């Protein structure tokens, strides 16, 4: 019998609640009241540790077994066989494209990569040393002012147009943010190139007529983009859904999602990993660093380790470790790799990490690869945001089309003072 029987010991009343998909509906608890005028029972779940906020058909994670599927396809298979644009199509539409669909999709994305010229002026307004992620998220938000049609979120073709624009324009914004910081002239998108080759072209082309990105690096970036494309209800995706639930345009919602990704506990972690590895400096300092992490001294955490959902090795980290060798064959080894490998070796044997099920996550090795490819540390969260845009827009659209969804509005337990008399300024002690 798929029900849950609850006895309220305050009243002796018994309730039977249906269980579906391993959950009870929180609203079913509302009928449980201690008195007639009682509001009804709520659940208290800070940080949503055990609350499903939606039904989603996009991404499946089994955190104990280390399984990650996009629309049913294992991440390892997609990383082996697909490219990022094909994966983005899968995430947005639910099926892998046939060749005609892929052609149209690629054409649509490619023909939306340009930015309005005013965007450049907007980017110029930032301080010379502005963090590229700050530029990125502000510029994405500013796109809403260029596309007022984006407010028509229930118009299917309009929504698709914004999805094309967003996926297409984020690499251009990212590259402009990067070049703004070093004072290089902006490079316009090249529609003859693949998604990742075009991005590398916009990042690194100088005076040459055509920049030829190394195909090994282009493919590695493509795989990294596939691995980062979606990850169900993480902090930034939850932000995208919550902001989008107010029916704001997707550019404004995505700016908020990118802001959530910026934090060091989320997409800022790969940047934090590199800073941590630099701070450790050499292999012989690793044991001492681990000791400090365990003692909680200075609020140190082993960045790139641990995950809210994965309680085993992050499957994305496994794929990244494999492609790292191909990248390092081309670029030469990143000197920080040895420190990272030693950290992992010691941590995976240490009781503190073993008992808490703390394993390397996607960010532990991705930064080393990005750095070896010549991408600066400040760009790491931006490099995460580019592919995650596919996940954000797919989750946003799924939320909008879900008849059960409403504006996101959590409850609270009030802990402030009871009603009291207002004290005029001259009477306050
Ligand atoms: N180093 C040291 N100890 C850790 C770490 C870590 N990286 N992560 C968790 N712990 C410890 C906590 O101190 C806690 O110990 P306690 O039970 O003795 O208090 C226990 O493990 C559980 O940790 P929580 O913080 O409760 O786990 P939570 O699920 O809230 O956090 C998170 C997950 C934020 C990812 C955390 O593991 C962390 O801060 N990791 C480092 C940052 C990082 O790599 N983030 C990237 C995540 S992947 C992504 O966003 C793409």
Image (cartoon, rainbow, N blue to C red):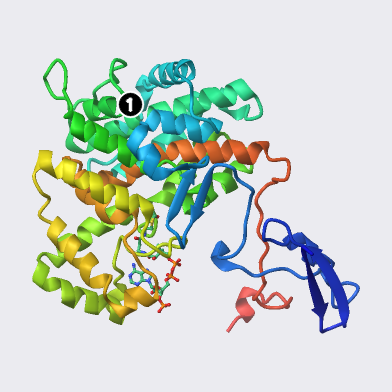
Q: Quadrant of ligand 1?
A: bottom left
Residue 211 vs residue 316, the one in the foreground: 316
Q: Is the residue marked 1 within 8 Å of ligand 1, measured from its CB?
A: no
Task: Look at the image and tell me whether residue 30 can be seen.
Answer: yes
Task: Look at the image and tell me whether residue 385 can be seen.
Answer: no
**Left or right side of 136 for 93:** right
Quarter of the image for the N terminus: give it.
bottom right
Q: Hey, which quadrant is residue 51 in on the image?
A: bottom right
As helix, strand or loop, the secondary structure at mark 1 comes to helix
Quarter of the image for the C terminus: give it.
bottom right
**Left or right side of 175 for 312:** right
Query: What residue sits 87% from the left and 82% below the top?
Result: 11
Q: Position of residue 355 (x, y in %)?
A: 38, 77
Query: What residue sits 40% from the left and 35% below the top?
Result: 139
Q: Position of residue 301 (x, y in %)?
A: 31, 69
Query: What residue sits 41% from the left and 50% below the top?
Result: 261
Residue 297 vs residue 329, the one in the foreground: 329
Give the vertical position of 221 relative to 262 (above or below).
Answer: above
Q: Which residue is mark 1?
A: 195
Q: Position of residue 91 (x, y in %)?
A: 50, 36
Q: Position of residue 205 (x, y in %)?
A: 17, 25
**Left or right side of 214 for 196:** right
**Left or right side of 151 for 216:** left
Residue 164 vs residue 67, the one in the foreground: 67
- Number of numbered discs: 1
Q: Residues within 10 Å of mark 1 (few under 14, many from 20)?
A: many
């Amino acid at each position: 019998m798929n029900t849950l029987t609850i006895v309220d010991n305050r009243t002796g009343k018994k309730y039977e609640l249906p269980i579906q998909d391993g959950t009870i509906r929180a609203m079913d608890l509302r009928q449980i009241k201690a008195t007639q005028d009682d509001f009804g029972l709520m659940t208290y779940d800070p940080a949503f540790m055990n609350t499903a906020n939606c039904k989603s058909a996009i991404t499946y994670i089994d955190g104990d077994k280390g399984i990650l599927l996009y629309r049913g396809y294992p991440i390892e298979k997609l990383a082996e066989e697909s490219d990022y644009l094909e994966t983005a199509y899968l995430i947005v539409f639910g099926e892998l494209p046939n060749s005609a669909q892929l052609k149209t999709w690629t054409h649509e994305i490619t023909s939306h990569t340009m930015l309005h010229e005013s965007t450049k002026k907007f980017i110029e307004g930032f301080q010379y040393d502005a963090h590229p992620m700050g530029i990125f998220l502000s510029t994405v938000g500013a796109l809403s002012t260029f596309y007022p049609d984006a407010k028509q979120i229930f118009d299917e073709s309009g929504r698709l147009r914004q999805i094309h624009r967003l996926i297409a324009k984020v690499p251009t914004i990212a590259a402009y943010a990067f070049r703004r910081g070093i004072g290089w002239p902006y490079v316009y998108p090249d529609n003859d190139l693949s998604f990742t080759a075009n991005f590398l072209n916009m990042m690194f082309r100088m005076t040459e007529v055509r920049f030829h990105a190394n195909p090994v690096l282009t493919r590695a970036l493509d795989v990294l983009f596939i691995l980062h494309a979606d990850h169900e209800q993480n902090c930034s995706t939850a932000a995208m859904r919550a902001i989008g639930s107010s029916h704001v345009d997707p550019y404004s919602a995505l700016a908020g999602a990118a802001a959530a990704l910026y934090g060091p506990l989320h997409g800022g972690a790969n940047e934090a990993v590199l800073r941590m590895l630099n701070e450790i400096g050499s292999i012989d300092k690793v044991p001492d660093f681990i000791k400090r992490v365990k003692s909680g001294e200075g609020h140190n955490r082993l960045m790139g380790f641990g995950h809210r959902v994965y309680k085993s090795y992050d499957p994305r980290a496994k794929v990244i470790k494999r492609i790292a060798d191909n990248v390092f064959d081309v670029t030469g080894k990143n000197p920080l790799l040895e420190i990272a490998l030693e950290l992992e070796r010691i941590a995976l044997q240490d009781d503190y990490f073993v008992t808490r099920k703390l394993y390397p996550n996607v960010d532990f090795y991705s930064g080393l690869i990005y750095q070896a490819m010549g991408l600066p540390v400040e760009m790491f969260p931006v490099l995460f945001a580019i592919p995650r845009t596919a996940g954000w827009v797919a989750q946003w659209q799924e939320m909008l089309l879900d008849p059960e969804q409403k504006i996101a509005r959590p409850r609270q337990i009030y802990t402030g003072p009871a009603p009291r008399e207002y004290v005029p300024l001259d009477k306050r002690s």
